[in-house]
Amino acid sequence: MDSHHDQVMKARATAGQGTKRYFAYSTILDRAAFLEWRDQHGYQFFELPQGQLGEAPDLSLVYDFPSRWWGGRVAGLADAVGSRVCGVVFEIAERDWPIIQHKEGAVTGMCVERPVKVKLTTGELVDAIAFTTNPARRSVDGPVSERFVEALTRGARSAGLSEAWVDSLKGA
């Protein structure tokens, strides 16, 4: 396994017993792609739990991280009054949080955690943690990754997000 896997496994061993709310809006929602990544990185024991649909108000998607792997820019979050980002809130055991950090690119410094408010479909407003582009790595140079937008769209659709949201992603 890679050294990131070893870091994650050490962090899991010392993690607390609580849970964290994770607001997922990106390619982790593409279950097939997530399972492939999970298995490639030796986390077969980890299952993404059932989540709750929601939207984070006053945020928008911005394509501000050039990714060699995706062949173009991928999405992060930006403050934007009146906009919203749709996604899924998952309750993640603290011991599994390092796996989410690895998947989201926090382990490599690509992304950073940021607190967000999310309005669930039940109407409840909850605090959660999302991942967004590390400010030191932001750039709008180059094209948006079409492959990333396809995975984002596939994930949004499979998660049950609204067709209006799915359509907005295709226009990225």
Image: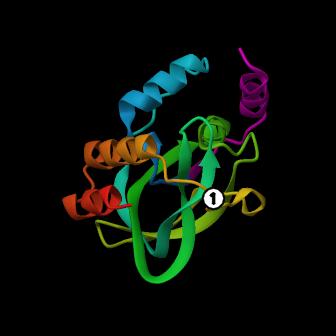
Q: Specify the quadrant of the image occupied by residue 84.
A: bottom left
Q: Specify the quadrant of the image occupied by residue 163.
A: bottom left
Q: Is 54 left or right of 109, judged from the image as shown?
A: left
Q: Which of the image's four quarters has the C terminus?
A: bottom left
**Way the structure is coloured:** rainbow
Residue at 58%, 52% in the rendered image: 20
Q: Which of the image's four quarters has the N terminus?
A: top right
Q: Is residue 40 magenta?
A: no
Between 50 and 143, the one lying in front of the other is 143
Between 162 and 129, the one lying in front of the other is 162
Q: Specify the quadrant of the image occupied by residue 93.
A: top right
Q: Please tell me how many numbered marks the rendered image carries.
A: 1
Depicted 35 relative to depicted 162: above or below: above
Residue at 56%, 77% in the rendered image: 79
Q: Residues within 10 Å of mark 1 (few under 14, many from 20)?
A: few
Depicted 35 relative to depicted 93: above or below: above
List the residue tagged with mark 1: 141
Three-letter code, disc 1: Asp
Between 63 and 28, the one lying in front of the other is 63
Q: Is 1 left or right of 140, judged from the image as shown?
A: right
Residue 106 at what x, y percent from top left? Answer: 70, 46
Give the residues in magenta.
1-20
